[in-house]
Amino acid sequence: MREIEDKKNSRVLNRRIHMANERTFLAWVRTSIAIMAFGFVVERFAIFIKQVSYFLGRPVEVGAPQADRGYSSIFGIFLVGLGALMGVLAFIRYKKVEKQIDADSYQPSLILDALLTISIIAIGIFLVIYLIHSI
């Protein structure tokens, strides 16, 4: 009787661990979607800067909008690609952890965490430089 209870408890615990893994995967998917959306906004940011400069009475020089648009377009496309890559890596991580849970050999991996941290730092630095040059 005790063996049946132990088996039932381990299955419930295993289900909970798998559900936690799925919640983590879904959080990474939300993060990758947010990064892609941010990339789209950054890509369109040059239009906003141009409109603000006209509103403030400081028209942007003829060559400047194209240069600004080029940087924001490249950076926006990079962010969309980064978000897509993070979604793929999140799925790979999800499947890897799922197998490790079943084999009871879980080993944490920092690749996705490091990628996100480095990306956020790089995005912040780029946006600060971009905004300083836009003023």
Image (cartoon, grey):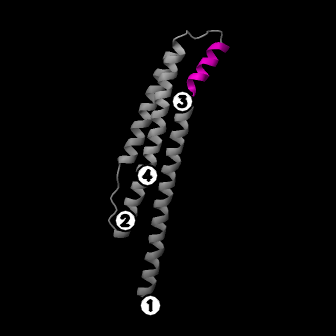
Task: Please tell me which residue is depicted at 48% across the width and 22% down the height of the picture.
Answer: 70
Q: Amino acid at mark 4?
A: Ala
Q: Earlier in the sequence, mark 3 or mark 2?
A: 3
Which mark's residue is nearer the viewer, 1 or 2? Answer: 2
Tell me if residue 20 comes above or below residue 116 in the rendering.
Answer: below
Callout 3 amino acid: Val
Q: Which stretch appears magenta? A: 42-55
In space, the residues marked 4 and 2 are separated at their CA atoms by 14 Å
Going from N to C along the chain, the mark reached first, 1 or 2, is: 1
Q: Find residue 21 and report its horizontal and vertical position in percent.
A: 46, 60
Residue 90 numbered tag: 4
Circles 1 and 4 in contact, beta carbons < 8 Å: no
Query: Would residue 104 appear left or right of 131 to someone viewing this image?
Result: left
Question: Which amino acid type corresponds to the residue marked 2 in the rendered image?
Answer: Lys
Element at label 1: loop
Viewer-side label of 1, 4: 4
Q: Is residue 113 magenta?
A: no
Determine the CA span between mark 1 and mark 2.
29 Å
Residue identifier under label 3: 42
